[in-house]
Image (cartoon, helix red, strand yellow):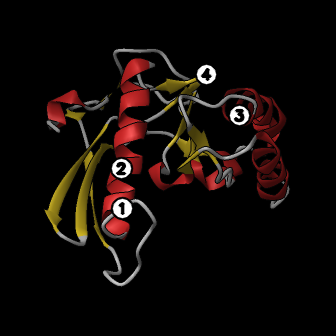
Amino acid sequence: MKIEDTITHDKIDQTQQMLLTKLCCYDPDVVIPGHKNLSYFYEYQYELLKNTCTANNYFFGQIRIPRFEVYRIDENTLKIENEYIFGRQLHYEHEFFDYYKEIIYNSLVLRSYKHVSCNDFGPDNFILKGSKKGIESDVDWEISYVDLEGFFIDISLETRKRTFEKDMNKL
């Protein structure tokens, strides 16, 4: 992934773009049926998520997903590069919480995207663009979900509903 592909944040005397790098070292002894090991399972999940994001311009309903790339380092290690999403975490925005809770429910709980579903609705996983000035993006967005590991394959609607209620009631 190129840093030039990330969201631009204009400041008074400069522009900024940020790229996050995450190194994931998986336990080699954990085997998931149908996959060589845990790292190959996650690589497969990320590939499904990437294909789904690309097909939907990095949106799940009204919710923006950061652009990302996954690179295999070795048999048990993946490197994930994703754009940094500027804004504030949802759990700090109590006065708007119910408004965004409804968007999250409609965009991530009630919808599944080609076998990819969200199943981690912790408010700290959501970033609000809000009135932050100087954020330029090729698409307009209000709320973003930044925990790529919160997406899983084929999570049932009932499970998503239960997880949503549990996670959103943590505040």
Q: Which residue is mark 1?
A: 35
Mark positioned earlier in the residue sequence (2 or 4): 2
| Tag 2 secondary structure | helix
Q: Tell which tag, 2 or 4, sits nearer the viewer.
A: 2
Q: Which residue is mark 4?
A: 61
Q: What is the C-alpha distance between the residues marked 3 and 4?
A: 9 Å
| Residue 44, numbered label | 2
Q: Quadrant of residue 116?
A: top right
Q: Position of residue 90 (x, y in %)?
A: 66, 45
Q: Position of residue 3 (x, y in %)?
A: 17, 37
Mark 4 is surrounded, within 10 Å at the Cα level, by few (under 14), some (14 to 19) or many (20 or more) other residues, namely some
Q: Position of residue 144 (x, y in %)?
A: 53, 35
Question: Where's the N terminus, which quadrant?
Answer: top left
Q: Is residue 85 visible?
A: no
Q: Quadrant of residue 93?
A: top right
Q: What kind of residue is marked 4?
A: Gly
Q: Tell which tag, 1 or 3, sits nearer the viewer.
A: 1
Viewer-nearest residue: 74 or 16:
74
| Residue 104, numbered label | 3
Q: Quadrant of residue 69?
A: top left
Q: What is the C-alpha distance between the residues marked 4 and 1?
A: 30 Å
Vertical side of 149 occupied by 135: above or below: above
Horizontal side, residue 164 vs residue 37: left or right: right
- The residue drawn where x is 41% and y is 15% is 139
Mark positioned earlier in the residue sequence (1 or 3): 1
Vertical side of 41 occupied by 77: above or below: below
Q: What is the C-alpha distance between the residues marked 1 and 3?
A: 31 Å
Q: Position of residue 20 (x, y in %)?
A: 28, 52
